[in-house]
Amino acid sequence: MDLNRSRSVKLNDGHVMPVLGFGTLAPDDVPKSKSGEATKVAIDVGFRHFDAAYIYQNEKEVGKAIREKIADGTVKREDIFYTTKLWTTFCRPELVRPALERSLKALQLDYVDLFIIHLPIAMKPGEELMPKDANGDFILETVDLCSTWAAMEKCKDAGLTKSIGVSNFNHKQLEMILNKPGLKYKPVCNQVECHPYLNQSKLLEFCKSKDIVLVAYSALGSQKNPGWVERDSPSLLEEPVLNAIAKKHNRSPGQVALRFQLQRGVVVLVKSFNQKRIKENFEVFNFELTPEDMKAIEGLNRNFRYFKLPFAVGHPHYPFSEEY
């Protein structure tokens, strides 16, 4: 990944993904319209990779923003790399294509650039995003992920998506897909939580050996969303080591955390709904961390996960029981 020359990486299917992506997930207290506004700001600033998902429930707004930026001549459709994700209630193979078609309809786009399995865990199908039983427990089910993958391959063949990948898979789950009899396409990426407190070095090494791109979410830690993240989680951006390196380079700790990922060959996602911060987050190509900086940041790893998916701990496909 030559960051000075190219700001994108070639995927194992020949398509190209920008190395810096804009995350479109809005906090619950932010109106959906803000996702559209932030998307437009991000395009104006220079972002071309947009990471979205059905579960975010704002693809209509994000799609409209992208289409308006295409209509006013700022970008062409082929300049934009748009990712959506297969939610857990659509993991049964017969539901995969209809799920993607739903996203396309909301977006009013003909295709997405990347369609990924959001989690290796399936939930009861239906209109509820997080189906619960009478006791308030989530209703999980077990689906053969290889059959889900075969349905993903068909979406690629149908031209509804250019590339297909996975998210939150451990190395054994990746192996299972890679060793699937009759595999037509390898996953192009595995999108996982990745930041200096959870640097995923073993999973990164494994993915590189299989020509699978590791894409980092929560690269700046996490805004402690009480539904998903424990309240007493450490704040990455307050980390003294990051702050010292940031001060040395006259940068923000966030810029340092993003640059760290880019220099180790990780595609990195970042989200913000603040105009100044969106601009700041894009300014990571015009400075370089030294080998000593990289080593110091690598030393921060403590295998700390913000997103532990507690509701799925008992599921046979729960991904985080494995070391990586």
Image (cartoon, rainbow, N blue to C red):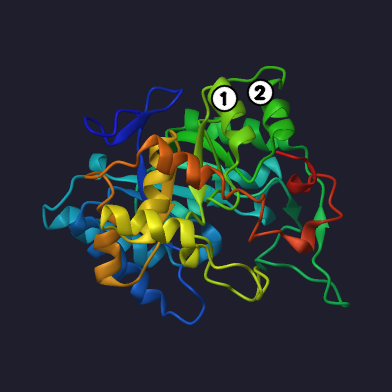
Please indicate, yes or no, whether residue 23 appears anywhere in the rendered image. Answer: no
Q: Amino acid at mark 2?
A: Leu
274 lies left or right of 153: left
Q: Mark 2 or mark 1, which is nearer the start of the sequence?
A: 2
Is residue 213 shown above or below 56?
A: above
Q: Which residue is mark 2?
A: 178
x and y percentages locating residue 102 in the rendered image: 50, 55
Residue at 68 percent of width and 40 percent of height? 93
Q: Nearer the viewer, residue 185 or 103?
A: 185
Q: Residue furthest left?
A: 73
Position of 75 compared to 234: left or right?
Answer: left
Q: As drawn, which residue projects farthest toward the top?
A: 182
Question: Circle 1 is placed at which residue position?
Answer: 186
Query: Is there a contact, CB below 8 Å, between mark 1 and mark 2?
Result: yes
Taking the spot 82% from the left edge, 52% from the top edge, the residue there is 141
- Pick whichever, 272 or 185, lies toward us: 272
Is residue 281 visible from the viewing direction of this image? Answer: yes
Residue appearing at x 35%, y 46% in the figure: 20
Quadrant of residue 139 in the image?
bottom right
- Name the quadrant of the C terminus: top right
In whole angstroms, how far apart are the C-alphas of marks 1 and 2?
6 Å
In the rendering, at what x and y percent does residue 260 appear? Answer: 42, 44
Q: Can you say which quadrant of the picture contains the N terminus?
A: top left
Mark 1 neighbour class, 10 Å CA radius: few under 14, some 14 to 19, many 20 or more:
many
Q: Residue at 52% x, 62% y: name it.
A: 236
Badge 1 marks a residue whose secondary structure is: loop
Q: Amino acid at mark 1?
A: Lys
Left or right side of 270 for 189: right
237 vs 185, nearest the viewer: 237
Secondary element at tag 2: helix
